[in-house]
Image: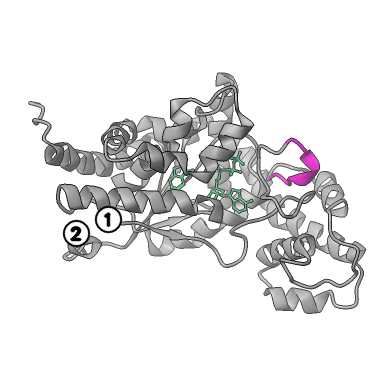
Amino acid sequence: MDNNIKANDIHKKVIFSGIQPTGKITIGNYLGSIKNWIPMQEEFDSIFCVVDMHSITVNQIPAELRKNTYDLLALYLACGLDPQKSILFVQSHVPAHAELAWVLNTITYVGEMNRMTQFKDKSRKHADNINMGLMDYPVLMASDILLYQTDLVPVGIDQKQHVELARDIAQRFNNRYSPTFVVPECYTPKIGAKIMSLQEPTAKMSKSDENENAVVTMLDDKDAIMRKFKRAVTDSDTEVRFDVENKPGVSNLLSIYSCFTGKTIEQAQNEFSGKGYGDFKIKVAESVIEGIAPIQSEQQRIAKDKAYMDEVLKDGAMRACRIAYKTLDKVYKKVGFIPKIR
Ligand code: ATP
Ligand code: LTN
């Protein structure tokens, strides 16, 4: 069905992704998402969003949310997202996201929402604030994706279930009304799609982790990065070998090293064969420090230039609105809303 919609289309495929401005971005976020977006800009019509509306599904301090939003945009730019090549914008600047979400809510079932892993996790973590927004989060995410007729959604593995829901909702709408949405696909990188906690290598590295030794952020300084990797939990063995099941800690470090150096896992493994964990951890830390240093200085420079960031956001919102409202107009017509006289 998606092929029909695009049959005569000479456009490039569309990618859409986003991150919540909910605090310090981790190397997990970077490796699972932003890093992969950079080369994709050359090949795809690319749209990247700071999803501030998603972030208020857990309590935020307003002044911090404002700062985190600019900081995340500065990080996007510092990592190499280019406003000449991609549309960069803030979700709340394009009201169509909330408007489409309302319509999609009416074809989404409560049972489906109750099964969402992230909703169950976050309900456990924020037992005092299980709000409707938290439950509806995946529908707003489907709206983000479907508004832009997205073909591919580059994210970490934890978001796969949400992208699958977006596919189901798109297909359901297309079947109930008529072909309207492209049915999107999830794109996850081969290595780095799930970076694990440094302290508990069977759990995902998460920016909301309370143990700061478990998480390396994109803003950590050299010493902190070195310290955290030196303390990383491995195993009582001595062999540097990729074996997720039996050696999750070492395998996680090998993945991180591979992502930051561009070496394959095999090359990395060979490099450290016969060497102890001490050396290995230091080398991994150095690769991360070296990989993120230029991003850090660029991020700090851009974060001071609010006028430039506002310019990028204004242009991004305008371009995003143009595409989003084209889709929303179609949707409103198909569900039977009468056109507004302009
Ligand atoms: P939180 O843990 O507070 O819920 P988060 O770290 O998952 O937040 P998000 O904004 O939800 O952050 O995720 C942004 C992007 O980063 C998504 O594409 C997500 O799949 C990816 N991502 C998050 N954590 C990891 C990880 N540990 N490894 C790889 N990718 C990740
Ligand atoms: N739920 C995502 C963030 C997100 C997103 C999106 C990602 C919101 N809308 C649309 C891709 C496409 C997360 O990473 N937690």
Tell me the element at label 2. Answer: helix
What is the image's colouring?
one colour
Q: Quadrant of the C terminus?
A: top left
Which circle marks residue 224 in the picture? none
Q: Is residue 45 left or right of residue 17?
A: left
Question: Is the CB–ligand 2 distance for label 1 below 8 Å?
Answer: no
Q: Quadrant of the N terminus?
A: bottom left
Residue 304, quarter of the rendered image: top right
Q: Residue at x 70, y 42 (%)?
A: 219
Question: Is the CB–ligand 2 distance for label 2 below 8 Å?
Answer: no
Q: Which residue is mark 2?
A: 5
Q: Which residue is mark 1?
A: 182
Find the magenta span and give its range: 210-217
Most extreme residue toward the top is 62
Q: Is residue 169 left or right of residue 51?
A: left
Q: Badges 1 and 2: C-beta atoms under 8 Å apart? A: yes
Q: Amino acid at mark 1?
A: Val
